[in-house]
């Protein structure tokens, strides 16, 4: 391979950086000076310290995005390493990607039903400033009488309440899950109430932009579902603040964002979409359904990452009901394709046995045949492929944190005119939620909520048992205690406690008592319902003035 | 000039720095996790570059624009000059005129020396999608078209070849008052110039007479009027029905076509009626699809003389697939096709077992099941959501095997 001068110099830099890393590690090791925890661990928020105002728009080609993920995705052949954006207690810190909400904040039913909504919907007459340029749903960009910008999208012709209800419901759920979401409002539009700005440009098939006319609006509305009274139901999404950069990729980092250090395939909240996607049938995980914007925070430009379009969920999309196999197979999969080819189609999959009731606003969405472990988006993102059991456990806890009432509240936001359709969608989400819990919570050692009090009593919980998706281990739990030297990383055994069915242990004698001391505890199950529970969860506590503080949690090794 | 490192290397560099940031650090390096991360971010800030597509992405973008977005400019073409012409390639140039009308000029050439040159304007989607028109004119040269005689009692060994040049001009309008209906009207000029056939078979004038090949030696010029009415059920109608004519797993098409061929010398004028019925029946969530096609073509007036090269026929890659192109000709034809399809990949691959039956006769009342010629076969189709750009089929009829390569759906 020939290297250009520039690539040679870059390679030199690369080697230099690696050398620094090696030397730093070597020095740390030789000196015995590696520090596992800093005083500010665990950090609740990912620092974003640099100005990203210079980030530039970059539109990822749809065909390229699909082709790359389907056929050239490097994540297929890489080891599944631990997510890299975790704080020291195995949690995702708040960031421009994610905000901890459900499970972390005391959300109530009203919060979930409200979602990202911060104010009223469009005020007065809408003036169209541009047709919608992306996505399959018919729509346009408009300003209301207050000057607010709105992205308006309609139901597809013949699919009343389909796309709009999906957008509304999914928007609430993904907001509660922690993703940056746009603010959506369900509205009804009459064509004669719409105005077209003089500056609105229309792009006909020729590609030569010209002023938008009334006939162009008619062309948009021709693809939308017209109600019996001549009106159109639509979703108005509030324009996002900041400079629009287009979508993000599910691998690598933005080369123009200084704060984007962790490759996206190693971000847990993106890996977790495997579980959240399974729950909601978020089949279309393409870059085009995401959006990066530069917003101002603390006087700096920060790139905020939105799951901007979660409308590809449940059983219906912008053009109508989902294909039967969506959620079950990628667009291309060699194995089932060849099996179907040679068996003349008699190689049958579960989706071919699924039954869908006739709710046009819900489409093909069901729970009976649903298997969360088998769920697949149209194309596998690198983050999807890198997802591990600890990521899925983290995600499943969030799904299971939705109460029945929260789910019903989110579904109510869909504005279904048919109560039976609303009930059906809610029922399916409840059942799929429970299947998520059953599939992913017991698949790793599910111990959570560790605390160590001043009296040396360690308490914890079992998320799988608590959720009712697994039996408690027959012989209880055991714990190994260590004094941990944060400077050297060495652990000195203190004692063993255990074989107790209770979710608490009294620490053995010899627990360090001085401020700044660390203790490490390994807790595992004995004779558990799933063998993975014998792998201990390792937790670390630091002695502080106020008592012991949980500063570390490791559920699975870094590399599997 | 300052050189920037290639994207891949820059990303590796950024990754190495990120890795560095994530490593356990000597106590003296940073005082906090926040500082550690901030240092890595500050380091990356020194090496920012704008996102840039890779070479592979650039190629995909170029191909996407060339094949899917139909921009003005040159384009490659895989199509047919005339059935039986063999593998054909071509190229064209198109240019938008106004919002959606496309002016085009294109040419095709086949391995059997068939040629087509045409130019025109095509404007779909007018009047809110209800109206479209197409104007085109051109010249076609088919050098070795087979003729086997009239009726079903002919032998493959009776084949003779003829050649024809066709100069044509056509104005066609399509009207869809409601989305599921389609009406088409066209006025066409067809000027034929027949010649001795090329290829490995005798020329038609050596084997046939005007009694066995009506119109032999004639070079008629026609004004042809065509009217089509059909029920075309597609998803745009809001009915869960046939996705498109180019590729379908559901729904159907039911159409009638009338053609008046007016010979400018009034010697070979005739009227013809075609009935076309298509039904796709999905089975078990479209695991299988039973596709049925029936077609009847008939010259309406017994007294009219129809030139041999314009007679209804069966035999080709989309009719009787086990037989050569236009193997059977007469004043009427009937075709029945059934396909049992399965879908190995819903995005792009269908396989089908098929059975075709067809015959020709001088009058529809002469059709008899005992005279039907049949074939069976298997085919694979590479398709998109609305088109079948490649169909490869192997069919066996009473005259042997036939391999079909086509760029359209069979029906």
Image (cartoon, rainbow, N blue to C red):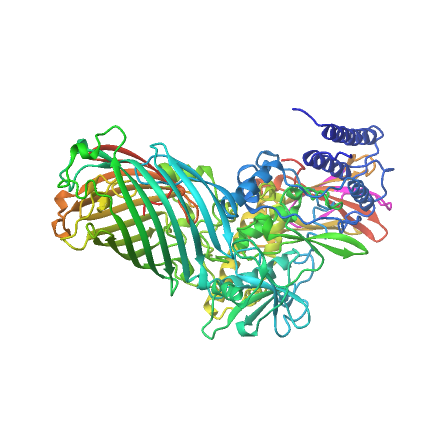
Q: Is residue A529 visible?
A: no
Residue A390 is covered by the magenta coloring: no
B73 and B248: which is toward the camera:
B73
Q: Residue visible at 69% across and 44% down?
A: A254
The quadrant holding residue A135 is bottom right
Q: Position of residue A415 (x, y in %)?
A: 53, 69
The answer to whether residue A172 of the structure is visible from this angle is yes
Q: Is residue A218 left or right of residue A355?
A: right
Q: What's drawn in magenta, residue-wise?
A: A494-520
The one nearer the camera, B39 or A485, is B39
Above/below status of A49 relative to A233: above
Outermost residue, front side:
B265
The quadrant holding residue B348 is top left
Q: Which residue is at 64% across, 70% downward?
A: A144
Residue A497 included in the magenta stretch of the image: yes
Which quadrant, please, contains the N terminus of chain B?
top right
Residue in the picture at 56% in, 51% down = A277
Question: Taking B296 as reference, is A112 left or right?
Answer: right
User: Residue B317's spot in the image, x, y percent?
Assistant: 30, 40
Is residue B359 shown left or right of residue A455? left
Location of residue B39 by image quarter: top right
- Residue B217's x, y, as percent? 20, 40
Closer to us: A30 or A365? A365
Which is more toward the observer, A191 or A22? A191
Q: State how many labels appear.
A: 0
């Amino acid at each position: 391979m020939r290297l250009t001068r520039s690539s040679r110099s870059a390679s030199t830099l690369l080697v230099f950086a690696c050398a620094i890393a090696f030397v730093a590690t070597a020095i740390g090791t030789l000196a015995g000076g590696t520090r596992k925890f800093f005083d500010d661990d665990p950090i609740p928020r990912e620092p974003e310290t640099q100005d990203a105002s210079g980030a530039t728009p970059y539109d990822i080609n749809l065909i390229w995005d699909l082709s790359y993920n389907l056929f050239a995705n490097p994540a297929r052949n890489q080891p599944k390493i631990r997510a890299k954006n975790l704080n020291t207690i195995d949690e995702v810190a708040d960031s421009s990607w994610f905000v901890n909400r459900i499970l972390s904040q005391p959300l109530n039913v009203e919060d979930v039903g409200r979602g990202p909504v911060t104010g009223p919907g469009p005020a007065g007459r809408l003036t169209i400033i541009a047709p919608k340029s992306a996505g399959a749903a018919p729509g346009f960009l408009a300003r209301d009488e207050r000057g607010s910008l709105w992205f308006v999208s309609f139901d597809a012709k013949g699919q009343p309440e389909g796309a709009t209800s999906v957008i509304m419901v999914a928007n609430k759920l993904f907001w509660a899950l922690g993703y940056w979401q746009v603010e959506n409002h369900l509205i009804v539009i009459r064509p004669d109430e719409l105005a077209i700005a003089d500056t609105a440009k229309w792009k006909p098939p020729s590609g030569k932009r010209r002023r938008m006319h009334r006939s162009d609006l008619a062309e948009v509305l021709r693809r939308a579902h017209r109600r019996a009274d001549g009106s159109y139901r639509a979703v108005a999404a509030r324009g996002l603040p900041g400079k629009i950069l287009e979508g993000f990729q599910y691998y690598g980092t933005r080369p123009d964002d200084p704060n984007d250090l962790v490759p996206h395939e190693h971000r847990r909240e993106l890996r977790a979409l495997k579980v959240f996607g399974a729950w909601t049938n978020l089949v279309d995980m393409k870059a085009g359904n995401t959006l990066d914007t530069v917003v101002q925070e603390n006087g700096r430009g920060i790139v905020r990452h939105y799951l901007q379009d979660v409308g590809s969920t449940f059983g219906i999309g912008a053009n109508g009901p989902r294909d039967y196999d969506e959620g079950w197979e990628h667009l291309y999969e060699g194995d089932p394709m060849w099996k179907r080819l040679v068996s003349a189609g008699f190689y049958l999959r579960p989706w071919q046995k699924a039954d869908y009731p006739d709710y046009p606003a819900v489409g093909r969405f069901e729970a009976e045949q649903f298997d969360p472990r088998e769920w697949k988006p149209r194309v596998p993102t690198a983050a999807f492929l890198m997802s591990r059991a600890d990521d899925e456990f983290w995600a499943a806890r969030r799904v299971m944190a939705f109460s029945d009432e929260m789910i019903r509240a989110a579904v109510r936001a869909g504005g279904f005119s048919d109560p039976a359709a609303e009930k059906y969608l809610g029922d399916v989400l409840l059942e799929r939620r429970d299947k998520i819990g059953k599939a992913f919570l017991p698949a790793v050692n599910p111990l959570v909520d560790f605390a160590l009090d001043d009296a040396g009593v360690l308490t914890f919980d079992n998320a799988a048992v608590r959720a009712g998706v697994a039996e408690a281990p027959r012989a209880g739990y055991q714990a190994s205690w260590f004094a941990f030297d944060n400077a050297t990383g060495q652990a000195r055994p203190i004692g063993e406690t255990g074989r107790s069915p209770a979710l608490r242990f009294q620490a053995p004698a010899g627990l360090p008592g001085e401020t700044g001391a660390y203790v490490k505890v390994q807790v595992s199950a004995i004779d558990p319902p799933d063998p993975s529970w014998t792998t201990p969860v390792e937790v670390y506590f630091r002695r502080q003035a106020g008592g012991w503080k949980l500063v570390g949690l490791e559920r699975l090794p870094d590399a599997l | 000039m300052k050189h920037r490192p290639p994207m891949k290397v820059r990303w590796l560099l950024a990754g190495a720095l990120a890795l560095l940031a994530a490593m356990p650090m000597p106590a003296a390096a940073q005082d906090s996790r926040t500082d550690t991360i901030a240092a890595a971010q500050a380091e990356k800030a020194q090496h920012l570059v704008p996102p840039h597509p890779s070479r592979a992405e650039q190629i995909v973008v170029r191909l996407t624009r060339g094949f899917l977005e139909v921009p003005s400019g040159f384009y490659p073409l895989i199509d047919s000059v005339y059935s039986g012409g063999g593998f054909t390639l071509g190229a064209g140039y198109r240019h938008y005129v106004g919002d959606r009308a496309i002016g085009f000029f294109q040419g095709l050439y086949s391995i059997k020396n068939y040629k087509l040159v045409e130019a025109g304007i095509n404007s779909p989607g007018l009047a809110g999608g209800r109206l479209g028109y197409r104007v085109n004119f051109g010249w076609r040269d088919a050098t070795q078209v087979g003729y086997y005689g009239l009726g079903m009692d002919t032998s493959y060994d009776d084949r003779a070849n003829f050649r024809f040049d066709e100069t044509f001009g056509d104005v066609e309008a399509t009207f869809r008052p409601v989305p599921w209906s389609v009406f088409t009207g066209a006025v066409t000029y067809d000027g034929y110039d027949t010649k001795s056939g090329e290829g490995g078979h005798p020329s038609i004038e050596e084997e046939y007479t005007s009694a066995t090949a009506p119109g032999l030696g004639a070079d008629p010029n026609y004004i042809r009027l065509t009217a089509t009415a059909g029920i075309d059920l597609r998803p745009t109608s809001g009915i869960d029905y046939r996705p498109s004519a180019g590729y379908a797993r559901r729904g159907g098409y039911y159409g009638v076509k009338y053609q008046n061929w007016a010979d400018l010398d009034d010697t070979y004028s005739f009227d013809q009626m075609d009935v076309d019925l298509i039904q796709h029946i999905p089975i078990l969530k479209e695991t299988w699809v039973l596709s049925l096609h029936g077609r009847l073509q008939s010259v309406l007036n017994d007294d009219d003389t129809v030139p041999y090269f314009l007679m209804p026929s069966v035999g080709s890659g989309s009719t009787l697939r086990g037989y050569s192109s236009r193997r059977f000709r007469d004043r009427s034809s009937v075709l029945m096709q059934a396909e049992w399809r399965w879908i190995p990949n819903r995005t792009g691959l269908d396989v089908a077992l098929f059975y075709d039956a067809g015959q020709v006769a001088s009058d529809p009342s002469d059709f008899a099941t005992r005279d039907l010629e049949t074939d069976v076969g298997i085919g694979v189709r590479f398709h998109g959501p609305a088109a079948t750009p490649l169909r490869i089929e192997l069919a066996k009829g009473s005259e042997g095997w036939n391999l079909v390569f086509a760029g359209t759906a069979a029906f």
